[in-house]
């Protein structure tokens, strides 16, 4: 089965958008504004933005790798298992690259904000809590994907649904990777909180 042109174009568009947004954020990031902010607020903002940008760069990279690798798998797939797996890699990769690209594109405007230290600490706690919520969701993704994969592949060979098996495997792999990412994000966010 050949890769459809709209699917290939969508994957290319998502990849280009994620990369463009990430590059724009890096190129346009101004130096932090020092005027009218006390040192604790500046340090808290710098730590928040540094961790946020580092984590979103990792997510953008993971997303981009998945779109590229998933496109390769899908383009060369000879069976439904590989097609299901490739579609999941492209889909999750595109979503992750877009989320990371948007987050990185917001960084310059966040860097210009002048807030007291308590606001930057509140944002850091919110970021930590969001990572922990996503961590719990990742457990659900791994579980659901594994169940789909096992159920589809445990049937007698004549009635196996290899597309569902590949889709489940793809979901489980993405959930496992995000499980590690979100745990590290939560721990990093928590490590510098008072």
Image (cartoon, rainbow, N blue to C red):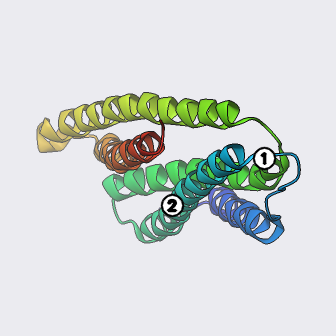
What's the residue at 33%, 40% (across, down)?
164
Please tell me the numbered disc located at residue 110.
Answer: 1
The residue nearer to you, when weighing 107 against 161, is 107
The residue nearer to you, when weighing 43 against 191, is 43
Label 1: state its secondary structure. Answer: helix
For the residues marked 2 and 1, what is the alpha-carbon distance in whole angstroms?
19 Å
Q: Is residue 168 above or below residue 173?
A: above
Please tell me the numbered disc located at residue 49.
Answer: none
What's the residue at 51%, 61% (across, down)?
58
**Disc 1 crowd, CA 10 A, few/some/many (<14, 14-19, 20+):** some
Mark toward the start of the polypeptide (2 vs 1) = 2
Q: Nearer the viewer, mark 2 or mark 1?
A: 1
Residue 134, x across and y down, in percent: 45, 33
Residue 28 is left or right of residue 77, and the answer is right
Which residue lies under the disc numbered 2?
58
What's the residue at 55%, 59% (across, down)?
54
The residue nearer to you, when weighing 169 against 164, is 169
Res 94 seen here: no
């Amino acid at each position: 089965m050949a890769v459809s042109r709209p699917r290939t174009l969508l994957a290319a568009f998502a990849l280009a958008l994620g990369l463009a947004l990430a590059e724009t954020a890096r190129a346009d990031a101004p130096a932090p504004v020092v005027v009218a902010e006390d040192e604790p607020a500046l340090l808290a903002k710098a730590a928040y933005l540094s961790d946020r940008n580092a984590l979103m760069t990792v997510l953008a990279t993971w997303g981009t790798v998945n779109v590229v690798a998933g496109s390769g798998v899908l383009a060369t797939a000879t069976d439904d298992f590989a097609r299901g797996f490739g579609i999941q890699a492209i889909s999750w990769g595109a979503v992750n690259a877009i989320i990371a690209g948007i987050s990185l594109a917001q960084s310059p405007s966040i860097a210009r904000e002048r807030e007291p230290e308590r606001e930057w600490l509140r944002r850091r706690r919110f970021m930590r809590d969001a990572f922990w919520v996503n961590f719990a969701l990742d457990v659900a993704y791994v579980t659901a994907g594994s169940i789909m994969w096992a159920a589809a592949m445990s049937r007698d060979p004549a009635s196996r649904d290899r597309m569902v098996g590949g889709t489940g495997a793809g979901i489980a792999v993405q959930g496992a990777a995000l499980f590690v990412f979100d745990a590290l994000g939560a721990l990093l966010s928590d490590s510098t909180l008072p």
